[in-house]
Image: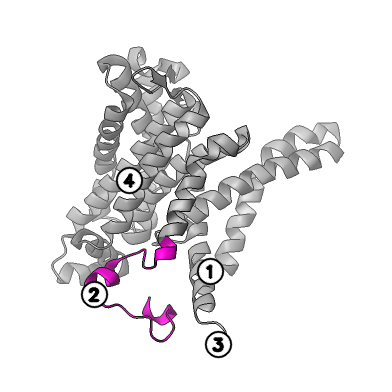
Amino acid sequence: MAVMRPAGDYDRSYQEDKSYIRKPWQWVVLIASIGVVATCPYWGTPYIITTVNRIGYTIIAVQGLNILTGYTGQISLGQAAFMLVGGYVSTLVVTHLGLSMFLALPIAAVGAGIVGLIFGLPSLRVKGFYLAMATLAAQFIIPWLTKHAFPEFLGGTEGRIATPVPQIGSFLFNEPARFIYITLGVLIVTTFIAANITRTRLGRAFIAIRDNDLAAELLGVNLFGYKLRAFFIAAMYAGLAGALKAHYQRAIGTEFGYSLTESIVLLGMLVVGGLGTNIGPFLGTTFIIVMQDVSNVVGSSFAGIMPPEMTARLLTSFRPIFFGLILMFFLIFEPRGLAHRWQLFKAAWRLRPFSH
């Protein structure tokens, strides 16, 4: 943003105006950040490696939700269900067709995208709260189908099937320290695509629909077509995230965190990070996952001083209470998310020592 630049810092070409990484030192920071994550298996503890993997595939799901909710303004409460679809599609393709996981990932993304397209059909007639209720149907229908339809393929009432370990030749990605390279590679690709969508005609149409759908329609934007595309892209991202999660956990099923609660947490990550920003999914996902782990530690500490009959209740209820308090705090004091605070910090740093 030009307002955040000191005098004399201006663009000399269209390439400079369009670039996200403007300075040589920013390239150094970017490459160093990727290097820190890539070398994590060599210096990180098992907890850090596991958490980095978890943050990586969750960011991908939140990026898809950001395209749908942050840029297009369409609320969805079924993102976790689309992750479940992606996990099942990838597992079945690898298990029964014998394809590599790297070929199964795009297939899982397209499969989840098609399902998301179906549940996005009501977006032409309804919006806001009513659209949230329509997408909520996916969160109930999809897990139910995985338990009761095609039991020989989907695991039946147990709702769980094993996922093959990904490999390249004889090299197995059977450890979190090895799987982190797959997560990082996919995350770089999805981030590049998500960051550039807003520069295209598609992204500008999404933003127009979010700001004022009636005005967008008068300007020639096909509301139904673009809303369906937003649902398709968001579900594709969720399918990718679900496939990565399934192969990382070596199993797929409803018991592995694909419930309505998970969809709400994903939406909360986006709100905390900042709707409609490229860095929001990174900040929100990292913050919430770290806070969830902190809540487990704090809850266990409190449980140690509580009466035995209250220990179990505290351990099960402290985490959702902690998450709810964090969400309330951000909605009251930082409604535009951590990304907005980061922008203000950058502006203050660039314009120092002037107070304005």
Q: Earlier in the sequence, mark 2 or mark 4?
A: 2
Quickly name the residue at label 2. Answer: 13
Residue count near mark 4 (Cα–Cα under 10 Å), binned few <14, some 14–19, many ≥20: few
Query: Disc 2 vs disc 4: which is toward the camera?
Result: 2
Specify the segment rendered in magenta.
1-26
Quickly name the residue at label 4. Answer: 189
As drawn, the label of residue 354 is 3
Q: Secondary structure at mark 3?
A: loop
As drawn, the label of residue 341 is 1
Q: Secondary structure at mark 1?
A: helix
Type of the residue with mark 2: Ser
Type of the residue with mark 4: Val
CA distance separating discs 1 and 2: 29 Å
Answer whether residue 28 is visible to the viewer in this image.
Answer: yes
Q: Identify which residue is drawn at 72% across, 41% down.
A: 297
Say if 300 sits above or below 75 in the image: above
Asked if residue 6 is among those painted magenta in the image, a careful observer would answer yes
